[in-house]
């Protein structure tokens, strides 16, 4: 047992929703004292870095109720129960943008808010994009606008806080790094 | 009103904790239908990219109850009520690592989980680091181990999923980009 570890003494389930659930755990700290941890359980998500053959980044504009505003993000969505991340990535890309890809490669995964949530986002890179003529229907509760922008435009959207979330900030920086390393 | 916007019809407060609160909003969608949004309110946080004069990145190893494991992160913490982010950044850096800095510059800010939470993380870059002899006490509920690593070691920790959260993945990639652009 690591000297940093916290032992669960009890778990109080507060809420179980469609997407998240909330519990409060009482824990024993490394010094023997007790404390409470407010914890959100989330099924996990995927996000897709997709660049078209003419070097445009595929993004979606979407209203986020949690933020009470519209932001621009890379295509993303939560994992359905039992769904493999790479299947989810292809599904979300097609549902949100109408694009299908020849290759979907895992890049990295990270927890978004380790202080209170277990949401793990898997980041994929989609290449060989082609637009489907008869694009699949989007989720009935989901309304997004497709936009396609250059890397320079994306960097400006970060500065202007229209791109304003962790996974998309990471994606833009990834493409900047690829360019700086001469890989694009 | 944007065509993507969702109108709040009602708000049900479910939980108010020490760090997060949870509410479920009923919303009217752009197509006139209604849906529910599960929303976490969070006070916001800061995180600090701090590199020592001998080019080591200052990190902390910390047990995260939400993940049930220990991960390696850049120094970070949540904003106290009314606290300015740059003050919080200096406080967290000193509390978690014992370092004080000559300069604390804002780099960017991003929402960590826009699908369900309003947590906004402000990322700072600290330079001119010096170690305080009589380092301030850490929070009584917080146990962290200071580690100082090279960029190459950090990249390995990302691959090995010991660095496993969005802000730290962003920070490591930022330092890679600075290096690739010859700025370090």
Image: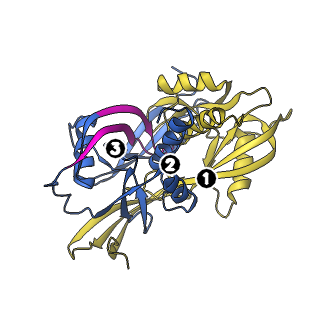
Chain colours: A yellow, B blue
Chain of the residue under label 1 = A
- In this rendering, the answer to whether A119 lies above or below B129 is below
Same-chain status of marks 2 and 1:
no
- In this rendering, the answer to whether B30 lies above or below B88 is above
Residue at the disc numbered 1:
A108
Q: Residue at x 41, y 39 (%)?
A: B10
Residue density around tag 1, few if under 14, some if 14–19, many if 20 or more, within 10 Å: some
Identify the element where label 2 is drawn.
helix
Question: x and y percent of residue B113 in the render?
Answer: 48, 45
For residue A47, say whether it is visible.
Answer: yes
Chain of the residue under label 3 = B
Residue at the disc numbered 2:
B169
Is residue A98 toward the left or the right of residue B48 in the image? right
Question: Residue reaching furthest left?
Answer: B134
Question: x and y percent of residue B169 in the render?
Answer: 50, 48
Foreground: disc 3 or disc 2: 3
Residue at the disc numbered 3:
B53
Gap between marks 1 and 3 measured at Cα: 30 Å
Question: Residue reaching furthest right?
Answer: A133
- In the rendered image, residue B112 lying in the magenta stretch gets the answer yes
Q: Which residues are magenta?
A: B104-131
């Amino acid at each position: 047992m690591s000297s940093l570890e916290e032992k669960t003494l009890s778990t109080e389930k507060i809420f179980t929703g469609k997407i998240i659930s909330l519990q409060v755990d009482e824990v024993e700290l490394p010094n023997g004292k007790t404390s409470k941890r407010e914890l959100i359980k989330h099924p996990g998500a995927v996000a897709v870095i997709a660049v078209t053959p003419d070097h445009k980044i595929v993004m979606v504009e979407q209203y986020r109720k949690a933020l009470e505003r519209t932001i621009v993000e890379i295509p993303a969505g939560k994992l359905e129960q039992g769904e493999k991340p790479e299947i989810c990535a292809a599904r979300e890309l097609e549902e949100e943008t109408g694009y299908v890809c020849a290759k979907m490669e895992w890049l990295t995964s990270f927890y978004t808010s380790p202080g209170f949530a277990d949401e793990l986002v898997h980041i994929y890179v989609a290449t060989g994009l082609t637009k489907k003529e008869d694009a699949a229907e989007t989720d009935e509760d989901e309304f997004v606008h497709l936009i396609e922008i250059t890397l320079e435009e994306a960097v400006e959207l970060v500065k202007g806080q229209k791109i304003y979330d962790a996974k998309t900030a990471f994606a833009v920086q990834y493409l900047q790094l690829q360019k700086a390393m001469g890989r694009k």
